[in-house]
Image (tube, rainbow, N blue to C red):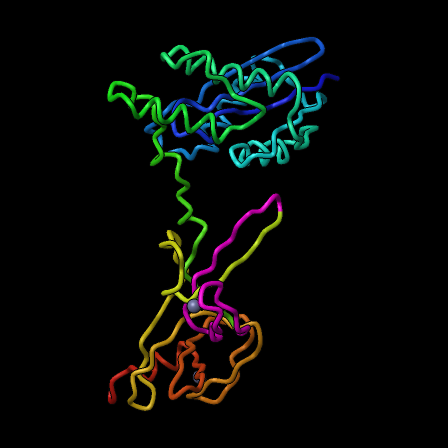
Amino acid sequence: MRTWYVEDAGGGCRAFSEVLVLVSEKPREIYTALVPLTWETGQTLEEVVLELVLEMMTRAGVTREDQILVCSGNIFHDLHRYLQENHYNWSTARMEGLAHEIAEQVFFEQIVRAGFPSYIKLNSRNYREFYQMVEKWVLENKSRLKYLKDRRVRQKPIGHKYCYKANRSRPRHCSRCHKTILPFTPMVECRINNRGKKIHRYYHPACSPVQPLKNKLVTMEATLDEHPVGGVITRSNREERCALCQLPIPAGQTAFFGYHNGQLLTVHLFCLNASHTPAGA
Ligand SMILES: [Zn+2]
Ligand SMILES: [Zn+2]
């Protein structure tokens, strides 16, 4: 069994490629990869990183029996998930030693190759200060702007974690305005994966911090008692009673839910259709 370390460097700097390393200390073996400054594939940064690390793992012949220690940084989230789902012997770890040294060294070599003065070095892990000097050096001269990372492709398209849907019977609290989201009204649900733990957040549609890219919300304007009533088409977890025919609506059956004068009205879909049928038809 061998132990492999996966580490990155340069992610906090607005310029130059992130460096990825796969390292074994005994026997000493080193693989490195650079994340391109930009890409056109529509992949997220985490996806690009996953691909590059898997390439290195293939070249290195890493097996499921080997131990893999991965830096816990966000940049490796997709890798963490991949290793977990594919039953690798892995865990996250704070990187010290060879992997860390190599990653820093490769990032530094990259900068020096571009012309950055090699006597300015990273001091006692003071990344902020060092990266600021690197960024300043890049911005000093138009011909160096090509070393800037493309921030647009690195921004997470987090909209796909947000979904329009109808709230069910439980009132929710809006994570933005902290007011109640009424049962059976439109809302935005956000699902975040936080270190393997699923976190849900709810928002009024107007309170959502990002434009959702998913939509499971079906709204409808019904006419009840000759009044237009806006509502949602969804299911209830419990048995409801139809406001039109007074018969039960079984739990789990799709129905119309709308508010009229502050009161929730539940109606069978077929009762709505029936009420829409013109008289004499
Ligand atoms: Zn709100
Ligand atoms: Zn009914």
- Left or right, 232 with respect to 57, comes to left
Q: Nearer the viewer, residue 194 or 62?
A: 194
Q: Which residue is drawn at 40% across and 72% down?
A: 232
Answer with left or right where residue 249 lies relative to residue 72.
left
- Residue 85 coordinates in the image, percent (x, y): 62, 35
Q: In the figure, is residue 22 to the left or right of 64?
A: left
Residue in front for this viewpoint, 69 or 278: 69
Please tell me in which quadrant of the rendered image residue 263 appears. Answer: bottom left
Name the residue rendered at 66%, 19% in the picture: 97
Q: For residue 101, which quarter of the picture?
A: top right
Q: Where is residue 147 in the image (x, y as percent from the top left)?
A: 34, 21
In the figure, 64 relative to 262: above or below? Answer: above
Question: Magenta stretch?
Answer: 169-196
| Percent coordinates x, y for residue 185 in the rendering | 43, 72
Q: Quadrant of the C terminus?
A: bottom left
* Ligand 1 picture quarter: bottom left
Q: At x 67% / y 25%, what residue is drawn?
A: 68
Residue 172 in the image, given as x and y percentages of width and height: 52, 70
Q: Quadrant of the N terminus?
A: top right
